[in-house]
Image: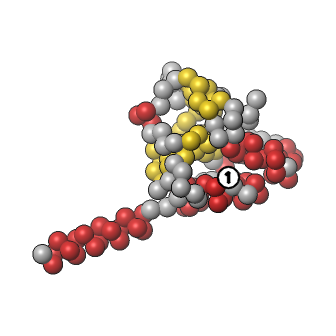
Amino acid sequence: MKKILAITALSFAALSAQAKDIVDTAVGAGNFKTLAAALTAAGLVDTLKGKGPFTVFAPTDEAFAKIPKADLDKLLADKAKLTAVLTYHVVPGKVMAKDVKAGKVKTVQGSELTIGTTGGVMVDKAKVTATDIVADNGVIHVIDSVLMPK
């Protein structure tokens, strides 16, 4: 009985140690520093630390590097536009890779993303490079470009 209790306690400890929200999960991954800075600048950190669930198409630092520095600096300084761009990367609900279907999906920003599944998954013109990074309030799918709302 003691052995079972010890295993159960260890399991709960491991589960608690792993449970992180979307923001903490992205920061912990190490290749989303620009995204984390942008979320802070837009005041969206608390939202993505909220209950959710959320599906986030997260551009890496390399994806943000494709934007000319002057344009990125201008975007980071414009809170309203930055908020629109970042919330365009977020879909309500937790959509795992196995559940992705081609078509349109409404974002938190209000516009629709176009999902393609031919030759790999595309979100608008961004390629999904990694999937199913699970957080306790949703899931992250990594993309290779920053999405811009139409």
Which residue shows up at 45% across the image and 36% down it?
A: 97
Report crowding for label 1: few under 14, some 14 to 19, many 20 or more residues within 10 A (C-alpha): many
Q: Is residue 132 left or right of residue 45?
A: left
Q: Can I make out residue 69 in this image? A: no
Quadrant where the image shows the C terminus: top right
Q: How is the image coloured?
A: secondary structure
**Residue that protrudes farthest toward the left in the picture:** 1
Taking depth in this image into account, of 136 and 27 the one nearest to the observer is 136
Q: Position of residue 27 (x, y in %)?
A: 59, 60
Please state if 86 lies on the left or on the right of 12 as rendered: right
Seen from this angle, which residue lies furthest bottom? 2
**Looking at numbered disc 1 in the image, what kind of residue is underneath it?**
Leu
Q: Nearer the viewer, residue 142 or 100?
A: 100
Residue 70 position, x and y percent, is 87, 47
What x and y, as percent, mark residue 130? 50, 42
Establish if 49 lies above or below 60.
below
Quadrant location of the N terminus? bottom left
**Residue highlighted by disc 1:** 35
Q: Is residue 12 above or below residue 123?
A: below
**Left or right of 75 in this view: 138:** left
Q: Is residue 116 above or below residue 2?
A: above
Quadrant for residue 12, please give it.
bottom left
Determine the residue positioned at 55% across, 23% down.
103
Residue drawn at (50%, 53%), measured in percent from left and top? 137
When asked about the image quadrant of residue 81, the answer is: top right
Element type at marker 1?
helix
State whether residue 44 is above or below residue 141.
below
Visible residue check, residue 19: yes
> Residue at image x 85%, y 44%?
71
Residue 109 in the image: x percent, y percent?
69, 39
